[in-house]
Image (spheres, coloured by chain):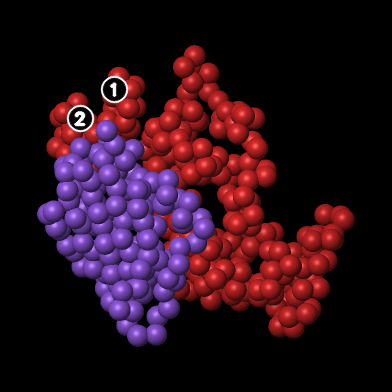
Chain colours: A purple, B red
Amino acid sequence: MDKVSISIPASPEYLQVVRLIAAGLASRLGFTIDEIEDLKIAVDELCAYLTGTQGRDGDLNITFGVEGSGLSITGTATLAPGQKVRTELTEFSQMILSTVVDEARLDQANGVPGFTLSKMKSE
Amino acid sequence: MTERTDLERAEIREIFQKYKAATTEEEQLAAREQLVAQFLGLVEFLARRFRNRGEPLEDLVQVGTIGLLKAIDRFDLEREVEFSTYATPTIVGELKRHFRDKGWAVRVPRRLQELHLELTKVVSSLGQELGRSPTPAELAKQTGLTEEQVLEGLEIAQAYNFASLDAPIDTEDGATTSFADQLGSEDESLENLEYRASLAPEMEKLPERERRILYLRFYKGLTQSEIAERLEISQMHVSRLLNRTLIQLREALETES
């Protein structure tokens, strides 16, 4: 699996860069426009948990895993102390994510908030 | 203008009750005016946060007041939340939208407008030809653009507000129709869906078309291209509306929790 990583400030305005990388890698794998748009929705949805809608004090580290069959994306947030991050997906998020990607979840490895998502190429 | 006073929470609730229960227009307007006077300070406070962006403060207060009116209209007394807490995101949202709409309309470089228009057309024509959504590589080949340009063009569609997107739609026979005309009755079992329960207040605030796109995408599982075809708008327009709606809902949910 090839890996691509990026670190951005935990602020929504930088998510465009993450979306563009996701789209670029998905495009290399032959994803269609519909699939790429879905992927971007998932990226936004999950990253929003880490950045909040107004941005937070800290950084987001995003790693893209590229395989022939699809793309996986993991993100972790290194935030200044005292910032609360939701650790469970809302019902609405679950519904959105289950429609647009194959796998999506939030996690809290060693107390660090993060997410994982994956999307396979359709045949 | 009505003189501003600081009322107690209970008094404010009382005015809201009057506003909601009003049977005549005068009664309602009078109550609304009281509420506006009460919260104009909040609007001014929030508008001031945007004042270094080259717009006169009075204009911003006006824009913010529109947000306040919307919030007054939508506020539900059943909620255990202070009105000011409830109204703040609506007012800020209105101010942000103002800059978004205005700023973008001015600053879209011609190159990007053309890129966008061309992509919009080709996504649709190539999609029909292939019977599925095209890939960026296919779009690049068809348009002579690079794959990077195609991807940039798709992403840029989110960031800019193209007036052409919101223009009336031309149907095949050349007649112009509005979205309202196209909202069939087939899917309107919307009424008793579980999402109404979990998201009801936020959903109610969405325009019909946005609500319908959400429904078709996440409940019916239609792809963006399929929704575009059904609503007779471009896939890129669907994408833009969907993203905008999700951002709005996210903001609303965040303020609630």
Count the marks: how many?
Answer: 2
Give the mark nearer the N terminus: 1 vs 2.
Answer: 1
Labels 1 & 2 near each other (Cβ < 8 A) = yes
Query: Which three-letter amino acid code belongs to the residue tagged 2?
Result: Glu
Give whichever of A102, B18 is nearer the camera. Answer: A102
Q: Single out the residue that lies furthest toward the bottom.
A: A81
The percent coordinates of residue B80 (x first, y second) are 68, 73
Horizontal side of residue B25 vs B101, given as left or right:
right
The percent coordinates of residue B185 (x first, y second) are 64, 30
Residue that appears at 12% across and 54% down: A2
Residue that appears at 20% across and 57% down: A64
The percent coordinates of residue A60 (x first, y second) are 27, 69
**In the picture shown, does residue A67 fall above or below B54?**
above
Q: CA distance from mark 1 to mark 2?
A: 10 Å
Give whichever of B56, B186 is nearer the camera. Answer: B186
Query: Where does label 2 land, which residue?
Result: B138
Query: Which three-letter amino acid code belongs to the residue tagged 1?
Result: Leu
The percent coordinates of residue B129 (x first, y second) are 30, 19
Horizontal side of residue B70 vs B169, given as left or right:
right
Chain letter for mark 2: B
Locate the C terminus of chain B and report the quarter of the image it occupies. Answer: bottom right
Give whichever of B176, A32 is nearer the camera. Answer: A32
Chain letter for mark 1: B
Q: Secondary structure at mark 2?
A: helix
Density class for disc 2 (Cα within 10 Å; few <14, some 14-19, many ≥20) is some
Query: Where does label 1 land, which residue?
Result: B130
